[in-house]
Image (cartoon, rainbow, N blue to C red):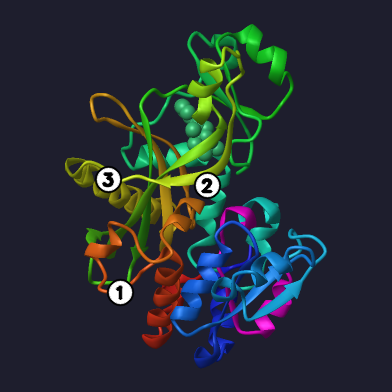
Amino acid sequence: MITREKINETLASYDKKKLKVATICSHTALQIFHGARQEGFKTIGICTAERQKVYEAFPLGCPDEFMIVDDLNKIPSGDLVEDNAILVPHGSLVEYSGDKLDRMQVPMLGNRESLMWEKDREKMFKWLTAAGLQVPATINPDKIDRPCVVKLAGAKGGRGYRVVNSPEEFYEHFEGMNVTVQEYLIGVRMYPHYFYSPLSHEGYRASEGKLELIGIDRRFESNIDEAYRTEKVGLSFTPSFTVVGNELLVARESLLGDILEMGKNVTEAAERLFGGIPGPFCLETVVDENLQFFTFEVSARIVAGTNLFPLGSPYTAYLYNEPMSMGRRIAREIKLAARENKMQKIIY
Ligand code: AMP
């Protein structure tokens, strides 16, 4: 694992007036480039040749320059350092870069250690329980006695997941595979997007700084989210959970206290366990009929649900007097940290 000292050395060598914002052209890249541009940064898109035209089709979300690679898992870390770049991690970057993440010499927004905690489900649950959150039970495959969702390793957007009801059904589909078996949660899914800033003075008090609720989404997953149609035409089907898009969700206002408190507790547990989580993160929750939250996943970086809000959300409207996306909020934090000489607080 590359040390904080090494990253701080790299940051110290950067020209603070010519910082660039870089990411892989995927996931939330349009929003990250758009927000960085609004805050006055030049941007770099790590992209394959065939994807370039997709980004060029959106001039305000298109990076200023492309670094063309033949595979998105090849992040040209050394070139990015030469270019004075800060890499912004997102879901695809975490998935594609695998275990190279912890060795990359390019400074990354946030605490890269938090991404290791996100990727390892055992660690993730340790983090969520240390934060005092209610989580679904993890079930031993031989003891499956209720509907359970079986999850493949990694951030694959729900692909390959399946609900099973018994050990026999489990072994029929997942024998010998690296999976997690979780109790199936019943209720409404809610995915709040947070931004924790150790530098800010506005928002909900958390750790040494403030927590902002930037938005909330819910996902559309194929085919479970259109199940009623499938059933209506008389077809039987196996539910699947492949994420295909997102929709806006506004929580009833009386839930906001719980939502903010959960985010604060996750921030403070991160501080105790691995040195904190500056920047964006998201909790994947299900709210049951008694208005109880159960959290089944934490994403320690920007999530795709934030793409709903390129010009701000129903929550940022009460935080900012200007359009504020998560992408722009990230860029604003980098700008603030560079100005106050506190980059090592939000970048590792
Ligand atoms: P994940 O990869 O954990 O983000 O899960 C992908 C999708 O599977 C989620 O968005 C949910 O719709 C569904 N899912 C995951 N875990 C559970 C659970 N414990 N109970 C019910 N649905 C779940």
Q: Where does the image place residue 263, in percent across and percent down from the top left?
A: 32, 50
**In front of the other: 18 or 103:** 18
Q: Which residue is mark 3?
A: 259
Decide if residue 96 is on the left or right side of residue 196.
right
- Quadrant including the N terminus: bottom right
Q: Where does the image place residue 306, in percent across and percent down from the top left?
A: 44, 56
- Tell me which numbered mark, 3 or 1, is placed earlier along the sequence: 3
Give the amino acid type for the residue marked by disc 1 in the picture.
Glu
In whole angstroms, how far apart are the C-alphas of marks 3 and 1?
Answer: 24 Å
Nearer the observer: mark 3 or 1; the answer is 1
Quarter of the figure with residue 25: bottom right
| Outermost residue to the right | 70
The residue lying at 43 percent from left, 54 percent from top is 281
Q: Which residue is mark 1?
A: 322
Q: Where does the image place residue 62, in percent across and percent down from the top left?
A: 61, 73
Q: Which residue is mark 2?
A: 118
Q: Which residues are magenta?
A: 76-93
- Tell me which numbered mark, 1 or 2, is placed earlier along the sequence: 2
The residue lying at 53 percent from left, 16 percent from top is 231
The residue lying at 56 percent from left, 71 percent from top is 61
Whether residue 105 is visible: no
Give the amino acid type for the residue marked by disc 3 in the picture.
Ile
Q: Where does the image place residue 239, in percent across and percent down from the top left?
A: 57, 22
The residue lying at 53 percent from left, 57 percent from top is 113
Q: Which mark is residue 146?
A: none
In whole angstroms, how far apart are the C-alphas of marks 3 and 2?
Answer: 19 Å
**In front of the other: 88 or 178:** 88
What secondary structure is found at the residue carrying circle 1?
loop
- Tell me which numbered mark, 3 or 2, is placed earlier along the sequence: 2
Whether residue 264 is visible: yes
| Outermost residue to the front | 233
Does the magenta segment cover residue 255? no
